[in-house]
Amino acid sequence: MLYIFGGLPGTGKSTLSAALASELRAAYLRVDVVEHAMRAAGVKVDGPEGYMVCYEIAKQNLRIGLEVIADTVNPIHITRQAWRSVAESLDIPFVEIEVVCSDEIEHRHRVTTRTTDIPGFTLPTWDEVEGRHYEAWDRDRIVIDTAHKSVDESLTELRELLGLKSKIVK
C-alpha cells in the first residue's frame, strides 16, 4: 500500500505521517529530508527533483513488498497524479490523505512556534505558507483536520478511516 500524504506546512502532516509509518513499520519518505540532503550535496533543487527521487525510492520499496508513507506538501494536481502513477505502475493499492488545520489562528501559531527536526533545515514562515500555491483537490481522499486535536486523536481518526486496528502492535 502507498499512503500519499499532502497538506500545507504546519498542519501536522509530517507528525501524523511519521506516526503512521512507525506503527506500520513502513518505509517513510519525506521530501523535505531528500531536498535538504540534495542541497547539502550541492545539487540545485528548484523544481520537482526531490519529488522525483522520492517517487523512485517509493517504487523500490513497494517492489520489495514494503508499505510506503509519502510525506510531501503535494500542492498541485501533477504531483498528486505522479504519486498515484507510482502505485498504479506496480498495481499496488494507494490512499490519498490530505491533512489540514482549519483554524487559521492555530495553524499560524504552529508555523511560527515550531522547530525543525532536520538539522540545518529552514522552516517556511507564515507568509510563505499563506502565499504558497496550493491547488484544491479534485478527487476523493481522506481529509484529517488536526485543528484542536492531539496527535493521538488525529492518528486514531486516521486509523478508523483507513480501517486499521485501533492500535497496531509493534
Image (cartoon, rainbow, N blue to C red):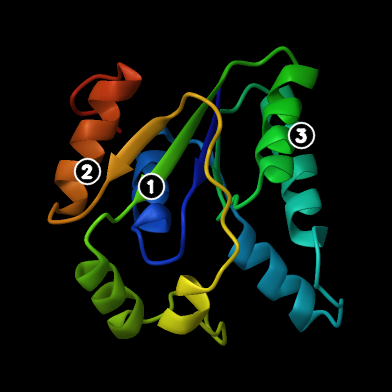
Which numbered disc, 3 or 2, marks the residue that appears first in the sequence? 3
Locate residue 55 relative to residue 141 in the image: left or right: right
Q: Label 3 to label 2, Cα distance in Å? A: 29 Å
Q: Between marks 1 and 3, how big is the CA–CA gap?
A: 26 Å
What residue sits right under mark 3 in the picture?
60
Amino acid found under the numbered disc labelled 3: Gln
Image-based side of 103 in relation to 41, left or right: left
Answer whether labels 1 and 2 touch (C-beta < 8 Å). yes
Dot in front, 3 or 2:
2
Q: Mark 1 is on which residue type? A: Val
Residue sitting nearer the eye, 166 or 158: 158
Residue wearing tag 2: 154
Q: Position of residue 91 (x, y in %)?
A: 72, 12
Tell me which corner region of the image, top left, top right, bottom left or bottom right, holds residue 139: top right
Q: Which of the marked residues, 1 or 3, is nearer the chain's N terminus?
A: 3
116 sits to left or right of 101: right
Q: Is residue 124 above or below residue 29?
A: below
Mark sitting on residue 78:
none
**Which of the pair 87/60 is nearer the observer?**
87
Cβ atoms at labels 1 and 3 below 8 Å apart: no
Question: Dot 1 lies on which element?
Answer: strand
Picture coordinates of residue 119, whole percent (x, y) = 53, 83
**First in sequence: mark 1 vs mark 2:** 1
User: How would you rate the neighbour count of disc 2 (Cα within 10 Å): few for under 14, some for 14-19, many for 20 or more?
Assistant: some
| Residue 67 sits in quarter | top right
Which quarter of the image is occupied by the N terminus? top right
The label shown at residue 99 is 1
Residue 155 pos. (x, y %):
25, 40
Element type at mark 2:
helix
